[in-house]
Image (spheres, rainbow, N blue to C red):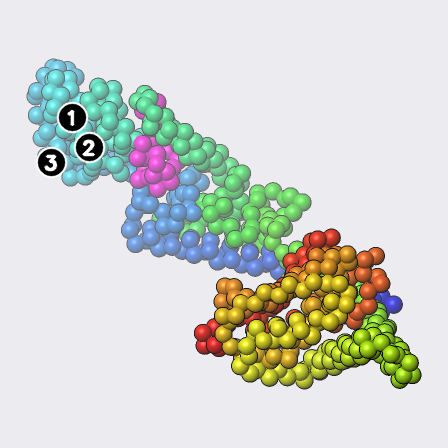
Amino acid sequence: MLFLVAVVLPAAALFALTFRYLHQDEEMARRLEPGQKFDAVDQAQRELTASLDAIRLQEVNRRAQSRETSTGLPADPAIVFALSLDKGRLTFPGETSQTLSYASARFISFRDDGQLREFQSRDFAAAAAAYQAALTVARQPAEGCESRLALGRVLLKAQRQVEALAVLRDMLRTCGATTDEQGMPYTLYAAERLISMKLDLPLAEEYLVRLVHEGQQREIPIGLPLVDSMIRSLLQSIGTISARQALAEDAQHLANFGQVVALQKELGRVQPLAEKEWVAYGTEPWLLKVTPGSSGPPLMLAVSSTKVAPPGTKLVPARTDRSYAMSGFTGLEIELDPNRSFAGDRAPAAMIAGGIGLILLLTVLSGYLFIHGVNRDLQMAEMRSHFVASVSHELKTPLTAIRMFAETLSLGRMNNEQAKSEYLETIVNESERLARLVDNVLDFSKIEQGKKIYRMRPTELPDVVRSAARAMQYPLSQQGFSLNVSIDESLQSMPADADALEQAILNLLSNAVKYSGEGREIELCCARRNGHAVIAVTDRGIGIAAEDQARVFEKFYRVRSSNTALIAGTGLGLTLVKHIAEAHGGAVDVESSPGKGSTFSLRIPVSEATA
Ligand code: ADP
């Protein structure tokens, strides 16, 4: 009943409460979630707008400062492209500078002269000289690159490879951002020549691979179909491993390019929207916005949505079952990470499961401890009642004997002097046994109350042992026991309570007598071993089973078996021996095998100091 009330019912109540709480928590979460999700979407939307605006302003400022509309890296890596919108067309970087206005008539006359000599009179040396002259008078980068290209070509025709190579290398270094009328960078012409004439394959390859690796950031930006296909065909014609790798890497660039071409076609639909707000375009999607340029035509920005999506969100171009629309954006939906919790600080399931597990564990553990405790109490109560019965019994036996012998003597009919003295001896002996029993009980009660006092005085152990042996001599001989005593006389005097020690030895000896069964030999030995004085009592009796050996020193504990059933005892003897041994800083232990006998050893440390 107590177990039920103290453990089972509270545990069940805890369970019930936990489950109710869980249920309510879930209910609450279900009600809260939509509201919280909207808050989350709202917040993500504000974050996104802020970062897009920052990117746009940064790019506009960059352009205003550099006044460079055709080339240069975009301000933010999230920008896919930033292109001018000219008369409803996206203008690619190469195209803006394609109208070459040659300021210098001298350049034109030298160049035309060179072409005349190269193609009509086929006088390559003279043509080279004319191009060289054109290069000297060139003012604009395009003039310089064009004359270099022609010079390289004619030098090759004149078989002057080394000079040609120097000119082409020079071009790769300096003409990166300069394009011809078709928007083709002069560097690509130079690379083509280096490859087709096999002048310097590694240099060309290195240049092209670098272009691809730089990706979005290459100095020749995305979206020029000719440039792109030129780079790809050159890489293909090189055909080395790193060239092929670069081609594979270029796939993203190519996909972007395809998307720009598609956008170009749909611009009429997209542009008006993009002038008002950010528009999602393509599968990634890109976020498009038309923004007024600092001077000249407006600018269209494309920003990669994966690079600007706020953490824990995904931007998608079409509605899904988990997506939410956002204001300020056209065609863009946001998905929230499903693993993100929107129900505030709910306790995670693992924690609750852990808690329930803990309750279970505690219930089982307290149940076990409870039952264990109750069992012990029951055992103790039983042992106590046994003890009372045993003490009464033990008191009665010697009393009966004393009374019987005393009565016989008092009648005065005994004439046999030997029998008389034997009776008297028995009376003395039995009263001594009574006194020992009473001493044990009194000592135990003192120990229980913490009032037992040991008086340590310099003691000769051999004397104590001899005294105990003498006290037991008569009862032993009466019952036919032979006591074999061996004493190491060299043991020094040590501080000890002689009375207590003698009591302990007597307890061990009377146990040896009681539990000897058929055996009639007892040994009492006192010697020095490993810094200890050891007093050992050995019998050839019934022995003690292994599982009982540790318990025989517990108070009231008595081994229950058919061998011991008829032997009277209180279960206190060994408890006292242990207490006495420990009071002397020592211990008592038992070696025993059932049917063969036991040895109880009382060990007391003898240090030089105590000596
Ligand atoms: P008791 O009054 O029962 O002898 P003890 O504390 O002296 O109480 O001993 C506890 C139990 O240990 C005994 O009941 C007995 O079963 C066992 N025991 C003690 N000494 C011996 C021994 N020499 N041989 C066998 N069993 C012993």
> Callout 3: 10 Å neighbours few (<14), some, many (20+)?
some
Mark 1, residue position: 165
Residue sitting nearer the eye, 593 or 201 = 593
Label 2 or label 3, whichever lies nearer to me, is: 2
At label 2, the amino acid type is Met
Q: What separation in Å lies between label 2 and label 3 (alpha carbons)? A: 17 Å
Q: What separation in Å lies between label 3 and label 1 (alpha carbons)? A: 22 Å
Residue sitting nearer the eye, 319 or 561 = 561
Q: Magenta stretch: give its range.
A: 209-236
Q: Position of residue 210 (x, y in %)?
A: 30, 35
Q: Residue furthest top?
A: 121
Report the disc number at residue 582: none
> Callout 2: 10 Å neighbours few (<14), some, many (20+)?
many
Mark 3, residue position: 137
Left or right: 309 as drawn, with respect to 440 = left
Left or right: 448 as drawn, with respect to 607 = right
Count of residue discs: 3
Q: What separation in Å lies between label 2 and label 1 (alpha carbons)? A: 10 Å
